[in-house]
Image (cartoon, rainbow, N blue to C red):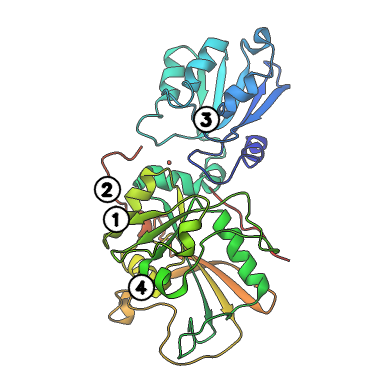
Amino acid sequence: MRRALELAALGPAVGDHARVGAVILSPTGDVLAEGWHKGAGTPHAEVDAMAKVPTEQLRGATAVVTLEPCNHVGRTGPCALALIEAGIGRVVYAVDDPGEQARGGADRLRAAGVDVVSGVLADEAEAFLERWLLSVRTGRPWVTVKWASSLDGRAAAADGTSKWITGAAARQHVHEQRAAHDAILVGTGTVLADDPSLTARGDAGELLADQPLPAVLGDRPVPDDAAVRRHPRGLLALPGHDLDAALRTLRGHGVHSVLVEGGPTVASALIAAGLVDEVLVYLAPVLLGGPRVAIGDVGVGSIGGRHQLDVTSTTTLGPDLLVRARPHRTRTGTDRSAHRATPTGAAADQAQNDRSTP
């Protein structure tokens, strides 16, 4: 199973799919083949692996897969049926598929006489698939809020200038985070004030292979000549100020993770609503003072109502410091974001390891 998780990590980190790996074992325990899901519309991991094995060798074999084999017809056929038709004798998987349409593969396999074992390395698989799993379970994307600030919490000087608070290494890390999310969200205020392109770029300014879908929240129109309108993935407008509706809309566009760079208004509103799963704070060793705070009102009237975070890592990026934190987890393993699940009538879907910057 641990090898299957390694294989899953070879698949694309963004896109409307789960990252899944599979290993096919002979009845004597020898590895017959390995496979992984290479993106939406491509064969799922177990089918990818079985395609590499002669048909006669699959009868009685064991399939070890990181996610419960699917039980529906989507861009591909149901993997549970493919395993049954191949004569697989045993299926071992880590995590149940929470998707309303896709789940049920284990029951279908058992009904066909296949030996099924679930929950193997479930904690590791849950951590690896956390973004995708949360988006399927709640009907909204995983939300990462990012900001850059001085040590005293200012996002800009008193006159509004903010380029650049952080150094080149921190700014490049932000571009890598953009590429590691399905979408990037800002408010219309940020678009009108800064005219950002919202693209993910490399050291030389080139566009990276993975580009987030740019989404703009708010009612003010985006100018026809705005840089974001030239984004290679187009522009998704999210009118109004209903955060739940905006996140559901993003999920409906196949977005499983969104990076929020929308300035203090959007970021603060999401934090206050309990809709944030991770915070990335890029701290520059400067002091600015003044009123331009990185985060505004987050609904805390007194110290007892504070938003408690758990720092998961700190990383030095040139002269700057990246602090990665998440909502404080209770003893039951839940957090504020999990309790603030967005209701949706059509909720039908990483862990993404942080890429280090030299």
Q: Is the Cβ of the residue at disc 1 closer than 8 Å to that at disc 2?
A: yes
Mark with earlier residue (2, 4): 4
Residue 120, percent across and down?
55, 35
Q: Nearer the viewer, residue 221 or 287?
A: 221
- Indicate which label's residue lies in the foreground, 3 or 1: 3
The amino acid sitting under disc 1 is: Asp
Residue position marked by numbered label 2 in the rendering = 343
Judged from the image, the secondary structure of the residue bearing numbered disc 1 is helix
204 to the left or right of 245? right
Viewport quadrant of the N terminus: top right
Sequence-first tag of 3 and 1: 3
Vertical order, 14 against 150 (above or below): above
Q: Which residue is mark 4?
A: 265
Q: Which residue is mark 3?
A: 41
Query: Mark 1 — residue?
Result: 244
Q: Amino acid at mark 3?
A: Gly
What is the spatial separation of the Cα atoms under label 3 and label 1, in whole angstroms? Answer: 29 Å
Q: Mark yes or no: residue 259 visible.
A: no
Type of residue at label 2? Pro
Q: CA distance from mark 1 to mark 2?
A: 8 Å
Q: Is residue 205 left or right of residue 280?
A: right
Kind of element beneath mark 4: helix
Q: Amino acid at mark 4?
A: Thr
